[in-house]
Every structure is written in structure tokens, then in C-alpha cells.
Amino acid sequence: MRWSQPSLDAAIRRLFPPSWTSGLQMPNLEDLLNKPPYTSFSDWLQARGIAQEDGGAWAFSASAGWKAVALGQQRGALHSAAQVEPLIGFGLSQEEHFRRAQQLAAAGSSPWTEAAASEHDLRFAAADLIANRARLREHRQDTRKAFAELADRCAPLTQQLRRFQPPSVQRIAGGINLGLVSALVIVMSWPDWRLPMRFVQGFQVVGELELTHVYERQSLPPPVPKADLLAASESLIASIEAQRPLEDTQFIWDSCVNEHKKGFGEAPTTRQAFDERYGQGGWSPIPAFCIEQSCGKKRRIDNGRRGGQNAATAYSEKQRMCSAFQPGLLARLVWEEAEAAGVSLAREDIHLETGGEDLPDAFRSIPCQPADLDVNIVAVRRPDTNEMFYQQLDAMLFGLSSAVIQFGRWGRFLEALGRRILALLWSMYVDDGNLTDADRARGAGQHLAGFAFKRLGTPFADNKRSPMATTGCFLGVDHDMSLATQGIVEFQPSGKLLTKATAQLDAMVEDNMCTPATASKFRGTAGFCAHAFWGRVGRAGFGPFRQRQYSDVEPWTLAKAW
């Protein structure tokens, strides 16, 4: 697609109410957006004979079975949701079935010889890497210059739009480059065209969430009305205040104090203060508890299920995210595109590297719309006085179903930016990012991603960066790309997880004790390890732990195996 300046102006203005951009001289973008890297993905689609709309975020609809095949796995058959359609149909005689099987074998045809099922923009990034392999580092640097120029030109639009952010939204999203996001929505033909507006007005916490068109549609029952949520608030508050103090009360209180220090919300205050602000029964809190993650880190969970906020939320789209084995798919795409172009990765000495990034305080980067702040209030007990306090936050909370959906909109956009504009083999699982690139780029791809995200106003966490290397860890699973150019990527559970799981088993044996809580923690740790073993074979021994967690009664001593 090629743009004229008038059509660009009109497209950007349509994203917002007319009064917001009235009298504003729109940035001159015609010369910039009509050449690479901004035209590269659409040109690639056209060259492959793929219609522009079929290259959209919503277009990739391969079954779970074919996605697993792309990673070398068969997860189901027959009536399984992850089935792969048989190459030889049913109802044949044994002789006919055998004959057709011989024909397929002679032709070398099987599900494993099919091209990997992947999004178009991921395959585009792989093709771009191969096409620019001779000057990959310079190619990444050229893209960085073009992105910097676009960001600079969009600055006046950003300043104009920030004038319309309510104070609570500006505290959370005041650093987002609104003009740049708007221009990228237009040039990528991004279907979630309301995204820039939400960073001005805020995102929904409850209600029927608007369609984004970046995920598959699904049918769910309507949400509980917000009025019903508020009507039940007095009984909810009474039950929260009557609850005995939790073991992690100090941790939960400290986390809320830190929220205020970081600027994500107000300081915790009394129930009376909120009654005066919203009226008695005009606000509804969210109880909180603490979990310990498999890595040993504690996290506060704001219980949207008990608070009723999740029941008061409905969404008509089903999120889809990658797995820990995504680096294997990325390597396979590079190998397939090299083969299609007649390029020998080994002969040209092209080796793949992997790197990782993390978006800090992910959900706290998504501002709530002011109309829903009255149900975005955390209930927290003050340890020294045992009194209940309440804290209103301006950002999405971890534990609300709406927070997952709303951050998913942003994450999906950032993922598409990395692939379609930056031409990187970039994938995101919520706030965790993984990048695969050729070693001859000498880290330029990772620098490009970091630069672009910083100019967008959502920089990576420096202390969680994994520099480009032949080995890496994504979602708790280690991977090794030393042999990727030979079609081999090795995976194994993270060493830290294996050490922790072994220590938990040793402690059970030493104490001759396994309580339901211990069984639950071990299943969480070992389940993550099992995910990284072929066919999840490590899950075979989970039955007794599941029984101990849910149905056994005291004593909690270990059963004898003889």
C-alpha cells in the first residue's frame, strides 16, 4: 500500500474525536512511510500472493495440532482438539491402506515435511534475514534510523494528544509516544485501531470488553452488571474485614506501599475515605493474597474472582500465545527460508543466536479508564494495627481477567511491530520477549528492538536482559541453538527449576512428610519441568501428588513403596 499525505492525515484524524486534532498541523510522513522498512511487509505479502487482509493479525488460524507439528510434536489424534488430519483416510482394506502408505513413503510426504505453520509476519522476518544476510548489521542500523525519524516527526501529535489524558491515565501512560503508536497503527493496517485512544482515555476494567480483532472470536455469557457488583460490595467488605490476617500480610502491605511510591496508585487509606468519595455502596474492593512462584519469587495476587470483578467482565476473543519452544520454530523458519532461496547456512557460515527481554511492571503500564476506578481498589491489612486499608490504583491489577486481555492488546501490537517494521524474529509471551537473529548481526537486532521500544515509551528492564548468545532461557525452559543451522534446537528444563524440584523431594523424604500445600508447590515446580521434557513425559508420576493435594486425609506422612 502506498500513502499520500492527505490520506495519512485523514486516517490519523479518524482515530480520535475531531476536536482533539482540530487546528493541528499533522506531521509530514508521506516520504517516510512509502519506503522500507514501512513498506517491506506489505511488499512481501504481495510477492507471495497473499492478500493484505490475509496478512492481518487475525489471519493465522492453524490448528493446535499443526502448530505442534511445526515444533516436531504430535499432540493428538482422531477427535482430539490437537489432531492432525490423517494423510490416508479411513474405511480402506488393509491391502489398500498399505499400498497408499508405500506411495506416501516413496514420495517422502508426511506432516513433518510440510512447511511450518506460523504467522505470516514471522516468516517475513525469517525471509528478510536471509535476503539481507550479507549486510545484516547495516540493515538493522538503517531500520533504526528510519524508526528514529518517524518517532521525531510524530512528537507534535504526541504533545497534542497528551492534553486530553485524564490525570489518572497520564500518571500511567504519560510516557507513551501516542503519535508514534497512531502512525504505526495506520502503516501496519492494525485492526485494533482503538488502541491509541485507550492510552488517552484508559482501558475498561469491567463490562463487555470491546473487540480488538487481533484474536479469534469466541462466545461467552454476558457479564454481571456493574450495578450488581456494587450492590454486593457491603457484604464483601464485611467478609474481608472479618477474615483472619494472612501469613503474608506484611508482604502484601509492603507491595501496596511500593505501588504508591512507584506512582501506580494512591496511598492506602481508610474505608471511610472511600465512602466519602463514592458514597456507601458506590465502590467495591478486591481482596489480595500472595503466591510463591516456581522461581521462589513472591507475588501479590489481586483476587478478581472473589471480588466479583472477573464475573463482571466478558470478552469475545480468545488469546493465543506462543510456548517455551518458540525459539525452535524461529530457527526452523530461517532454515526453510534459506532452503527456498537456495542458501546454505553452513556454507555461508550463518549461525543463530537467541536473546531475551522483559517489560517491567507489565500490567501497571495499562491505565484504567476513570469510570472504573471505583472497582479497581485493593483491600490490604496494615500489619502493625491489624486495620483494613484500601488502595485505589490507576493501572490494571494482576489477578483481573480484564488486565490479561487489555495488556494482551498492547503486547500483540508490540510483537507485530518487532516483526513487520523491524523485521525481527521477535515473539512475546505477556511481558517476556524472545529474539532469534544471526550472529553476524553482532547484537544489532537486540539493540534495534530496545531502541524502538524505548522510543515508544515502553523500555525494557535492563537488569532482566539476556544478551544474544547460542544458549538462552525462555519461559523457564533452556534452549541451545548451537546446531540450529543443522535443523536441531535442544531444550531442557531450567537448571534452577530442576535444582528446586530435587530439593523439594529431598525435604519430603528427610521429614517423612508431604502436606497438601507441599504437594501443591511440588506439582507447580515439577509441572514446569515436565513441560520441557519430550511429550511431557515427566507428568507420569504426578498422580499421587494430585491425590495428596485434593483427596488424602491426615496423617501426611509418606506412603511406603513396599
Image (cartoon, rainbow, N blue to C red):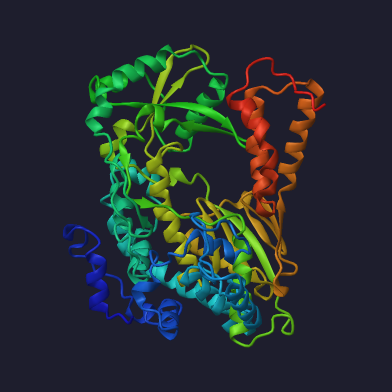
Residue drawn at x 61%, y 50% is 475
Q: Nearer the viewer, residue 262 or 127?
A: 127
Residue 160 position by quadrant? bottom left
Q: Position of residue 268 (x, y in %)?
A: 41, 24
Residue drawn at x 41%, y 54% is 410
Residue drawn at x 23%, y 65% is 13
Q: Nearer the viewer, residue 503 or 24?
A: 503
Q: Residue furthest bottom?
A: 342
Side (left or right) of 255 relative to 489:
left
Residue drawn at x 43%, y 66% is 60
Side (left or right) of 229 relative to 467:
left
Side (left or right) of 145 relative to 552:
left
Q: Position of residue 270 (x, y in %)?
A: 36, 18
Which quadrant of the rendered structure holds the C terminus? top right
Side (left or right) of 121 relative to 225:
right
Residue 440 position by quadrant? bottom right
Q: Nearer the viewer, residue 432 or 79?
A: 79
Number of numbered labels in the structure image: 0
Residue 8 position by quadrant? bottom left
Q: Is residue 12 visible?
A: yes
Q: Position of residue 218 (x, y in %)?
A: 34, 52
Which quadrant of the rendered structure holds the N terminus? bottom left
Q: Is residue 135 visible?
A: no
Q: Position of residue 298 (x, y in %)?
A: 59, 33
Judge whether 437 appears above or below 348 on screen. above
Q: Nearer the viewer, residue 295 or 155?
A: 295
